[in-house]
């Protein structure tokens, strides 16, 4: 585990933790070993916009134990503000995928995946189990009545608890996956819970991931927009403008911080 808590910074109206994929894996391994129920969240531009509009999403992030940065543009913005952020702090499923499954195979973890269309998660689970012997994977599609108190939702929670997983991946899209975790985490008997979006869609070949170099230079969104223009046009071309007031507030806060620092450490001769 971490020797100390990772640095948490405020950016675009929300908070994120400055962790690398390797640090995140160490944190998860420690929580699994200790049997501590844990939630791992992640922020990108879409979640930041939802964060402003939804009380449930804000509550989810308030209760999360670790909040990854899932956005190269967010890191670039943080650096502009003078925050100690670098590309090494970008944490998303496709970035830590190999490290995670290698660790899960080594530890013999049971992984439950909740989400996706019927049949998709099963294809992904079969492929992953063949690639990483030692991992036990169970899954359930995301097409069920997820309302609190519904019979179907209670059955899904019971299915997860019966499997007794060390890891629970919830991939039902934002904000449904965050709302489901918020509402059902207390009913789950254990495990580290991740919100992972379309992770198993990629594993099953239903969606094609962008080349990893595009993520590193901050243009992965262009690839996704080109492949799914109808679904993602609003998210990538319109929604980010809602963050403009938050960006201005960040700039003002950074200016005040620099002014205070200048006052505390005057230049020679002043």
Image: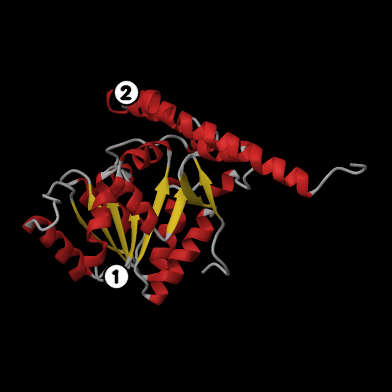
- Which residue, as the protein is rendered here, is positioned at the far right? 269
Compare marks 1 and 2 and give the one earlier in the sequence: 1
**Secondary structure under the numbered disc 2 in the rendered image:** helix
Circle 2 is placed at which residue position? 229
Q: Is residue 248 visible?
A: yes
Residue 91 percent across, percent down from the top left: 48, 49
Mark pair 1, 2: CA separation: 38 Å
Residue in the foreground of this view, choosing between 8 and 29: 8
Q: Taking 50 as reference, is 229 above or below it?
A: above
Circle 1 is placed at which residue position? 190
- Which residue, as the protein is rendered here, is positioned at the far bottom? 34
Q: Is residue 113 visible?
A: no
Residue 244 percent across, percent down from the top left: 47, 29
Residue at x 20%, y 68% (from the top left corner): 161
Q: Residues within 10 Å of mark 2 (few under 14, many from 20)?
A: some
Residue 107 percent across, percent down from the top left: 40, 70
């Amino acid at each position: 585990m971490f020797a100390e808590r990772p640095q948490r910074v405020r950016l675009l109206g929300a908070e994120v933790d400055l962790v690398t994929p390797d640090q995140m894996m160490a944190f998860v391994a420690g929580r699994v070993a200790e049997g501590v129920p844990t939630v791992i969240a992640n922020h990108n531009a879409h979640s930041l916009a939802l964060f402003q509009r939804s009380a449930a999403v804000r509550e989810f992030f308030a209760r999360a134990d670790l909040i990854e940065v899932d956005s190269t543009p967010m890191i670039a913005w943080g650096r502009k503000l003078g925050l100690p952020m670098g590309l090494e702090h970008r944490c998303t499923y496709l970035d830590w995928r190999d490290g995670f499954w290698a660790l899960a195979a080594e530890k013999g973890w049971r992984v439950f995946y909740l989400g996706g269309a019927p049949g998709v998660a099963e294809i992904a689970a079969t492929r992953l189990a063949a690639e990483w012997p030692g991992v036990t994977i169970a899954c359930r599609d995301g097409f069920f009545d997820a309302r609190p108190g519904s019979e179907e939702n209670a059955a899904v929670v019971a299915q997860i608890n019966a499997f007794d997983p060390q890891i629970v991946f919830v991939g039902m899209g934002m904000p449904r996956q965050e709302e489901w975790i918020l509402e059902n985490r207390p009913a789950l008997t254990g495990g580290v819970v991740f919100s992972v979006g379309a992770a198993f869609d990629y594993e099953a070949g239903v969606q094609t991931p962008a080349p990893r170099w595009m993520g590193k230079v901050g243009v992965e969104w262009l690839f996704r927009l080109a492949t799914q223009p109808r679904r993602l046009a609003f998210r990538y071309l319109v929604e980010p403008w809602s963050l403009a007031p938050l960006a201005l507030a960040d700039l003002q806060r950074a200016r005040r911080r620099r002014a205070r620092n200048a006052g505390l450490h005057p230049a020679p001769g002043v």
